[in-house]
Image (cartoon, grey):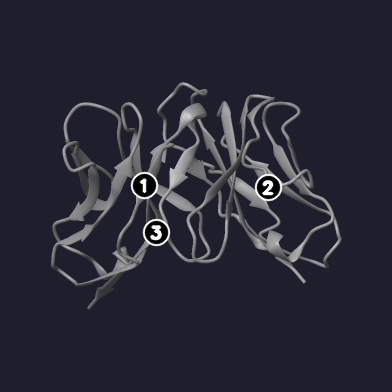
Amino acid sequence: GAGVSQSPRYKVAKRGQDVALRCDPISGHVSLFWYQQALGQGPEFLTYFQNEAQLDKSGLPSDRFFAERPEGSVSTLKIQRTQQEDSAVYLCASGRGGALSYNEQFFGPGTRLTVL
Amino acid sequence: AQSVAQPEDQVNVAEGNPLTVKCTYSVSGNPYLFWYVQYPNRGLQFLLKYITGDNLVKGSYGFEAEFNKSQTSFHLKKPSALVSDSALYFCAVRDRGNKLIFGTGTLLAVQP
């Protein structure tokens, strides 16, 4: 079946530009997560949605980062005024259960963002 | 705070030999542990998880992991390595709200 998809797969931005990264989760999955993976590191949590509600945004590194999931399905991660330190792979994951579940997360292929 | 540690940056093993990728954890409360594998330019793929019950967990592609509470470890194992197992492996622990805290990853290289 269809997995988690992300677009674009690669994005090059000039410093100061705004970018928008899209995530299409597996249909019917309640939970949606965004992670940031720097080169040579493990993924780090950014934010979590249960349906359309953003329940945890403690991992967002600054107020330049904003995420939404208005209809409880597709999600967009927006980064305003990009900086070079924002260069990373941004991973989206979805899961069946809510915040109290122990279900595994299914990851998309990621968007590689390069800020010049 | 929950955390996991992967003490080896890289593990080298010959094809056909058993492999072990190490992971130790530090948690408050019951640990909920996961292993994921990442191939180049692809997202993470779920291998297996420990929630409760049997200490030996079997997962995808012939992998298994042994949960050891006294040693706070959750090592990933496979009886006979394949060249196609060469990839980056991440151990993770569930934190509050179901988010995952990942280790730094271990690169597994299987030589033919």
Which tag, 3 or 1, sits closer to the chain's start? Answer: 1
Q: Nearer the viewer, residue A107 or B6?
A: B6
Q: Amino acid at mark 3?
A: Gly
Which residue shows up at 51% across the image and 59% down it? B42
- Label 1 close to label 2 by CB (< 8 Å): no
The quadrant in which the C terminus of chain A is found is bottom right
Q: Amino acid at mark 2?
A: Pro
Q: Mark 1: few, some, or many residues within 10 Å (few <14, many ≥20)?
A: many
Residue highlighted by disc 3:
B105
Secondary structure at numbered mark 3:
loop
The image shows residue B44 at horizontal and vertical percentages of 46, 52
Marks 1 and 2, Cα distance to the nearest angstrom? 21 Å
Q: Quadrant of residue B55?
A: top left
Q: Amino acid at mark 1?
A: Val
Number of the front mark, 2 or 3: 2
Q: Nearer the viewer, residue B13 or B97?
A: B97
Q: Nearer the viewer, residue B55 or A94?
A: B55
Read off the chain for label 1.
Answer: B
Which residue shows up at 16% across the image and 38% down it? B70
Q: Nearer the viewer, residue B100 or B62?
A: B100
User: Is residue A28 visible from the viewing direction of this image?
Assistant: no
Read off the chain for label 2.
Answer: A
Residue highlighted by disc 2:
A61
The image shows residue B90 at horizontal and vertical percentages of 38, 53
Q: Which mark is residue B4?
A: 1
Which residue shows up at 23% across the image and 45% down it? B73
Marks 2 and 3, Cα distance to the nearest angstrom? 22 Å
Secondary structure at numbered mark 1:
strand
